[in-house]
Image (tube, helix red, strand yellow):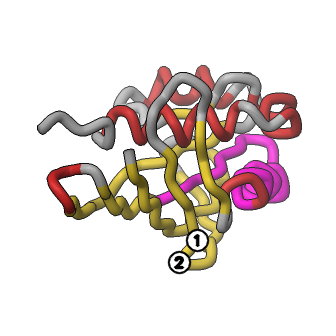
């Protein structure tokens, strides 16, 4: 039995749902990433254009022949300008995602996101950027 609930589709839904918010799109443009960039120079170039949002999956579970999925992920707001701007990126994502049903037109799955660990503020010395990081769950059916 083929399932519409898979990790790549889940990433597309969360990213698309975030970018559909006008306030997020204004702040980060299209700079919402589904994982950290491995190349520090590339990451620095992108961060030079303004704040970014990153989310990365940590673990998950699958039930009912793959039609129900739970994912744990970490959500980050990054900024080179200030910790306030990093917090703003995170807070906008939080406002958009927390306890919301994320659905994108044309993708036959939906899911509910929930923050399960409040964010912590830190500074990345390699990127010379501030970030906020919180932990989330996403439960999807498709």
Are the residues at dot 2 and dot 1 in contact (C-beta closer than 8 Å)? yes
The residue nearer to you, when weighing 31 against 93, is 93
3D distance between C-alphas at marks 2 and 1: 4 Å
User: In what element is the residue under mark 1?
Assistant: strand
Q: Which residue is mark 2?
A: 116
Q: Quadrant of residue 49?
A: top right
**Position of 134 compared to 6: left or right?**
right
Q: Which residue is mark 1?
A: 115
| Image height of 71 relative to 46, above or below | below
The residue nearer to you, when weighing 5 against 84, is 5
Query: What residue span does the magenta drawing correspond to?
Result: 74-94
From this viewpoint, is residue 90 visible? yes
Decide whether residue 111 is among the magenta residues: no
- Quadrant in which the N terminus appears: top left
Q: Quadrant of residue 103?
A: top right
**Position of 37 compared to 30: left or right?**
left
User: In what element is the residue under mark 2?
Assistant: strand
């Amino acid at each position: 039995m083929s399932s519409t609930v898979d990790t790549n589709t889940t990433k597309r839904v969360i990213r698309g749902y975030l970018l559909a918010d006008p306030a997020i799109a204004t702040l980060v443009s299209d700079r919402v990433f589904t994982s950290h960039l491995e190349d520090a120079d590339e990451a620095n170039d992108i961060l030079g254009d303004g704040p970014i949002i990153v989310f990365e999956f940590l673990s998950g579970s699958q039930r009912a022949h793959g039609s129900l999925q739970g994912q744990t992920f970490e959500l980050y707001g990054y900024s080179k300008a200030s910790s306030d701007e990093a917090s703003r990126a995170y807070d906008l994502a939080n406002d958009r995602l927390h306890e919301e049903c994320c659905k994108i037109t044309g993708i036959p799955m939906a899911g509910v996101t929930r923050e399960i660990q409040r964010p912590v503020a830190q500074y990345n010395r390699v990127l010379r950027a501030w970030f906020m990081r919180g932990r989330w769950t996403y439960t999807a059916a498709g």
